[in-house]
Amino acid sequence: MRSRVLPAFLLFLGCAGAVLAASVPRLESRGGDPLSLSDRATLAAWALAQPEVQSHVGASRLRFLRGGAELAKGEGGAEYRRAVLYYRNYDSGFVNEVEVNLETGEISVRDRADLIQPNQDEVEAALAVIARDPALAPLLGDASIHVDGGFYDRSPLAKDPCSKNVCLIIELMNAGHGNGWAHRVIVNLSRETIANRDFHGPTREGQIVPLTDLGGN
């Protein structure tokens, strides 16, 4: 967890100015080709090591979510290859989006506040938290239980830790279509704890329900 490791509405909470970075590492892929798995890992590690990215994220705990490359048009319509990398920030609760001009090494960093969904590594991290819970762990090994999710969500209540922390919804579904869930678990990945063992959403229109079990408060 402590490794530093689409069209959607974007809410930019901050934007570091474009800066010139060190030489971009040599990649296997070229032009408009997608990044290979090796390229993705290489770029993800390289970008985090750049001083400009470090100055933006500070000592935050980050997890690399995903990334890709494409041909884009710059000033005057000239094409260039760029990569866009996404890191979950477990301290701010947002996603740091790092854009890299793969030809010049220019970098820009933005904080994204929209609900970017988890990758498989993040889901597995949430399942590992559940597996450490004595009451919930047996359900993961129950052949009649199907694991669905996780799904990233943010609580609308400021007093709820899940309004800032990174929280995933993991549904432990009963066997058979339409039989609902045995438990709907909220895992707080920022704290690596179970936030809610049996989450139930709103039962009436307009009701606001915290993701974390606040004990009826």
Image (cartoon, rainbow, N blue to C red):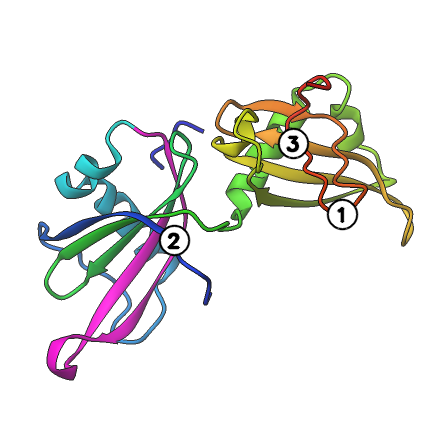
Name the amino acid type tagged 2. Leu
Residue located at (14% from left, 51% from top) = 17
In the rendered image, which quarter is residue 154 located in?
Answer: top right
Number of residues whose C-alpha sits closer than 10 Å to that of mark 1, classed few (under 14), some (14–19) or many (20 or more): few
Q: Is residue 190 left or right of residue 136?
A: left
Mark 3 neighbour class, 10 Å CA radius: few under 14, some 14 to 19, many 20 or more: many
Position of 85 relative to 7 (above/below): above
- Label at residue 210: 3
Q: Which three-letter amino acid code belongs to the residue tagged 3?
A: Pro
Q: CA distance from mark 2 to mark 3?
A: 23 Å
Image coords of residue 63 (percent x, y): 40, 38
Vertical arrangement, residue 134 with respect to residue 205, above or below: above
Considering the image in quadrants, where does the C terminus appear? top right
The Cα–Cα distance between marks 1 and 3, rounded to whole angstroms, is 15 Å
Q: Is residue 62 magenta?
A: yes
- Whether tag 1 and tag 3 are in contact, CB under 8 A, the answer is no
Amino acid on which disc 1 is placed = Glu
Q: Would you place residue 171 above or below residue 110 in this image?
A: above
Please state the extent of the stretch shown in magenta in the rendering: 60-86
